[in-house]
Image: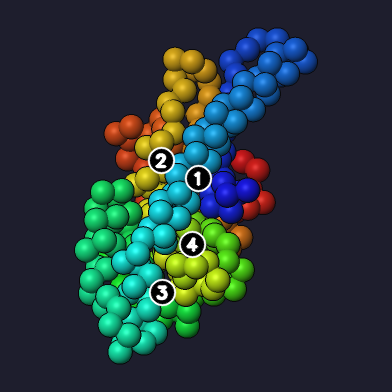
Amino acid sequence: MLIAAVVAIVVAGTIEYRFFTKQLAAAQTGALLSAAELQSNIVRRHLEDRRADALLLSSRERVRAALASAEDPASGALAAAGVQDLLAATHRVYGYHAVQLFDPNVGLVAGVGDEERVARKPAYVRQAIATGQAVVIPARLEVDGIIEYGIVYPVFSADGARVTGAVALTNDARAMLVPLLVPLRGRMTTVSTAIVVRDGEEVVYVGSAEDGNRVVPPDLRFAVTDRA
């Protein structure tokens, strides 16, 4: 599923009690599972919306024309510069970290935003072009602290006969995913929800709906095997 490829939802709870019983434990487990399902569904819908954005962008005639021009500059099709404003509008209106258009050889045809991370996208772009399917770019902590995730969608020719390139839309998890989480204080006073991503043998804390104005270390890490 999309959400599994991008982030993990972690729900932790504490109970203040005098007498521990199986019934109380079962009730708390149910509350935690319900909270996790609620937050997971919110993130899942967000990711499906990003897939829809990528599909819409990939089907625009200006995108196809820019790829045709990149393939054959003498074709008279729209040059790459002619699609730049469309990518810029998508970047601005939907708040993407980066919006990029790639040719079949995974060359960057046009793009807005994050140029530094183009190098990590070729494998996902190649997969989207080879399979003709949307491909998730899993969340990853970058050296500058950005936790980037996104989706690559193939661009088909007007007759649908071949894949002519791909569009890549990426976001910053701290800026886009964390604000989606629903604060559970008041509903479940002992429950807190957080988003984490795996980085090697560690998990990195992305953020929580309960953070508010709290100062959270920018790179809070835990070992994957840490049960504390």
Q: Circle 2 — which element? A: helix
Q: CA distance from mark 3 to mark 4?
A: 10 Å
User: Which mark sits nearer the N-terminus, 1 or 3?
Assistant: 1
Nearer the viewer's eye, disc 1 or disc 2? Answer: 1
Residue bearing mark 3? 102
Q: CA distance from mark 1 to mark 2?
A: 16 Å
Nearer the viewer's eye, disc 2 or disc 3? Answer: 3
Residue 48: give its label.
Answer: 1
Q: Circle 4 — which element? A: strand
Residue 93: give its label.
Answer: none
Residue bearing mark 2? 178
User: Neighbour class for label 2 at 10 Å: few (<14), some, many (≥20)?
Assistant: many
Q: Amino acid at mark 3?
A: Phe
Place residue 215 in its image quadrant.
Answer: top left
Residue 153: give its label.
Answer: 4
- Determine contact: label 1, label 3, CB under 8 Å: no
User: Which mark sits nearer the N-terminus, 3 or 4?
Assistant: 3
Q: Relative to 184, say whether 77 is above or below.
A: below
- Which residue is found at the position 54% from the left and 60% from the top? 134
Q: Amino acid at mark 1?
A: Glu
- Which residue is found at the position 68% from the left and 16% from the top? 27
